[in-house]
Amino acid sequence: MAGILAVAQTAEVATGTSKKTLLQLVAAANHRVKVKEISISFDGTSNTAAPILVEVLKQTDAGTMSSLTPVKIDEDGDETLQTTAQHTATAEPSSGNVNMREQVHPQGGYTWQAPFGGELVINGGDRLGIAVTAGADVNAVARMIFEE
């Protein structure tokens, strides 16, 4: 790893009311990625709304999504990011192991920051997604900060 920090983040995405992947990171072949932070926030307006299930999970394929370009946090280096990203699934990818599962109120958000040495590792060629299941449609913004 070259220690390059980068971020992949969505614009506002409508959650819908069935499971939806908002963001997926794809590690390049033979190139591991360390995820250092995962964040999601919602713009719900009802204080009595049911919590939204947020899952951070391995995904075994791409599903059908739109391309998203991660950006380097420190833009001074000449290196090119190898990791790619996708957002807003219209056909869900196949789910693998769930790394984290949280219930988050739709008026709030959730941020996970890796403890030192405790980053989530995406092996070369593998995928990690943030998926939500909401009882009512709200908008969400999802973000992953990672190191190559």
Image (tube, rainbow, N blue to C red):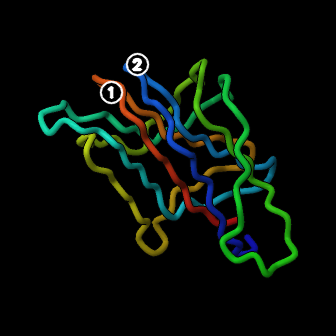
Foreground pick, 90 / 138: 138
Using the numbered discs, state the Cα–Cα distance from disc 2 to disc 1 in whole angstroms: 7 Å
Residue 134: numbered disc: 1
Q: Indicate the secondary structure of the residue bearing disc 2.
A: loop
Which numbered disc, 2 or 1, marks the residue that appears first in the sequence? 2
In which quadrant will I find the C terminus? bottom right
Q: Is residue 70 above or below residue 93?
A: below
- The N terminus, quarter of image: bottom right
Compared to residue 104, the image places residue 90 above or below, namely above
Binning the other alpha carbons within 10 Å of mark 1 as few (below 14), some (14 to 19) or many (20 upward) gives many
The x, y position of residue 94, in whole percent, is: 58, 23
Residue 103 visible (yes or no)? no
Query: Residue at position x 68%, y 29% from top?
Result: 62
77 lies left or right of 132: right
Front in this rendered view, residue 40 or 24: 40
- Tag 2 residue: 18
Report the side of 36 relative to 60 (left or right).
left
Q: Is residue 141 above or below residue 98?
A: below
Q: Secondary structure at mark 1?
A: loop
Quarter of the image where one finds residue 77:
bottom right
| Residue 82 image offset from top left, x and y in percent | 80, 56
